[in-house]
Structure formats: structure tokens, C-alpha cells
Image (cartoon, helix red, strand yellow):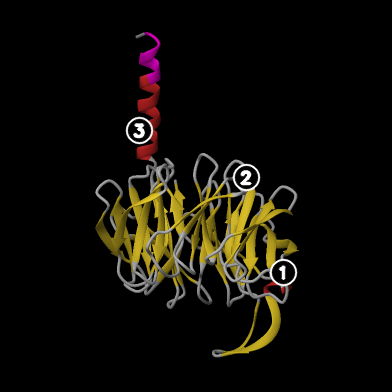
Amino acid sequence: MRVLVPTVVGLVIATSALVAQSHTLIVLSHRNHTAYELDPESGRILHEYAAPDQPHEATVSPDGRRVFVAVPQGPMVEILEGESLTRVGRVESPEFSRTPVQTANGLNSSAAPHGIAITEDGSKVYVGLENADVPGVVVIDPRAGKVLRKIDLLLQGGHYLAIQPGTGKLYYPHRDDNRVVVLDTKSDRVLKVVPVKGGPVGVAFRPNGEVWLHEDGDGSVTVIDGKTDAVLQVIATGGKGAGRIAVSPDGRFAASSHGGTEDVALIDTATRAVVATIPLGRGPGFPLFSPDSSKLYVMNSGSGDVAVIDVKSRSVVARHKVGTDPFGGALKTR
């Protein structure tokens, strides 16, 4: 008993700290060009920032003091103060431009800075350039607010990227080329290019090192071994359409959203089986789990809200109206 008591007490304290960890959501609404900070418990909007154009994706510094927002048609990256969403900086660069091309919306000269992620130590921000003359990734010094270098990749369809905790490996799916580029953020060198069918877009990480990918093309989910970067399994979710993926902090569940079938698939990561398909309405986008893994938040561009899902009951327990068409977002702990 003398051995067990302090162990149990320690577990209770650790669990309580996890449950008590407060958090908010950074919600990006496209048509009204606004980034919001939302309290997911009350549904109250705490702060907002009107961007020059559509904010697409965001990343939050490890200390929560800065929020970096990619604005593809700016083209720019906005640096916001974490407590108030006040703009404190802006990253503009010739790397964000491309040779002008005629589109349905007019002449476009943006390289489309889109996917964005920050390293665990907060020293580098990575931004994917989907439509550059030579597609690739730029590396930004977040403190100086300037581009350090560009990494040319020559692949098409890089829409989203993420950095794996603990390893510093960046995973950058390319949905048009059906490949995932793996970068070492310490050396900024390409480690591997992994073939993944189905149009890979979203990336999330399980605490055991597995890499989970959402595929826009066929709605499937691919699991990769984070040590060898070999494909372990492809999971047919039954869903269709564009979306993203998240893995709960406790590693028990993955959530893959689907714009075509208007739902989110909840997957048991141990068995790799879909355990629930939750209808959400038009345009489900980014899924995000709460720090204690009890709630799943999904941005819904079609219905203009954020759905709050209770993971235990696997049901929508609240919907919070945010902007016009929220799709992207990030979690901010404090």
C-alpha cells in the first residue's frame, strides 16, 4: 500500500491537471475574412481579427503568445497577439508570389501560402506554397517575422502540413501527386517521400508515433509508422469529400471529416475501425479534440458554426455560430 498510494495520488493530480487545462479555439471564417477566438464551453466569441483576405489555416506558438495565420490571396502570413488577436506583425515575401495566371476570378499572382505549422520550440514556422511556380515550403523566423529560406519540392497539391511532436518531422501531403513529403525541421532536408493513394490532405499524430492521414479523393484514412514512414493500413471510412483529421491527445480516437457526405468518422485507433459516423450538415472542415480528449470540435463552413461533439456519447451536444463559413482553425491552451 505504501507504494501504491503515492502512485494513485500522482495519477489523480495529473488527471485533474489535464481536465482543468483551459483552452479556446481559433476559428477562421472565409467569406468575411475574419479570425475568431471562441470559448467552446460557452460559445462566446472572445476576440476577433479582420484579415485583408481569406484566412485559411493557423498555428499557435507553444506558449500561446502568438497566432500565425496564412492568408493565401494576401499573399501573406499575419502574426497576431495570442491574448487579443491584435496584429503585431506581417510576413510578406517575393516567395509568396508567382508568375501571374488567368483564373475565373481574374489575374492571380499568388503562390498561395496555405498550410502552416510551428516547431515545438517555437523557433521556426513552416508554410506550404501550393501554387508557386516551383511548389514547396518556406521557413519563417517567427521572432524576426521574415522568410529564411524556401525548400523546393516540385509536387502538386500541397494543402496542409503538420509537425510531429517529439521528432521534429514535418509531414506535407500532396493530394494531386498522391505523395507525402517528410522533412527534418532541424536540417530542413527531405527525409522521405511516401506514396499515399486517395489524395492525402490532413495530418495528425498518435502519441505512439503513428501518423494518420485523411484523403480527400476517396475519403479514406491512411496510417503510417512514424519511425519507418511505411504505410501500415488504409481504412475505408465510408465518407466522401474534402476534410481534415485529428487524433485525440490520449491517442484513443481519430476523427476524419468529410464535406461530401457531411459527416465526421470517429475511428478507434487501437482496432482501426470506424466506431461512429456523426452527421454534421454542410461543409464540415477542421476537427479538433479538447486537451482532455472528451470533446471533439468540428468547423462547419456550410452551416456557419462549430459543432461540439461529446466523444463518450458520440453525439452533437452544442453548436456555436461563428462568422459566415468557418473551415480552418487551431486549438489554443492557456
The disc labelled 2 sits on which kind of residue?
A: Asp
Does the magenta-highlighted stretch encompass residue 3? yes
The disc labelled 3 sits on which kind of residue?
A: Ser
* Element under disc 1: loop
Residue occupied by mark 1? 154
Mark-to-mark CA distance, 3 and 2: 26 Å
Q: Nearer the viewer, residue 56 or 240?
A: 240
The disc labelled 1 sits on which kind of residue?
A: Leu
Q: Residue at x 36, y 60 (%)?
A: 264
Q: Which residues are magenta?
A: 2-7
Q: Nearer the viewer, residue 40 or 80?
A: 40
Residue occupied by mark 3? 16
Q: Which mark is residue 121?
A: 2
Could you classify mark 3 by the number of other residues whose Cα lies within 10 Å: few (under 14), some (14-19), or many (20 or more)? few
Residue 4's quadrant in the figure? top left
Mark-to-mark CA distance, 2 and 1: 28 Å
**Can you say whether 22 is above or below 60 in the image?**
above
Among numbered discs 1 and 3, the one appearing first in the sequence: 3
**Can you say whether 23 is above or below 151 in the image?**
above
**Can you say whether 40 is above or below 253 in the image?**
below
Residue 126 seen from this side = yes
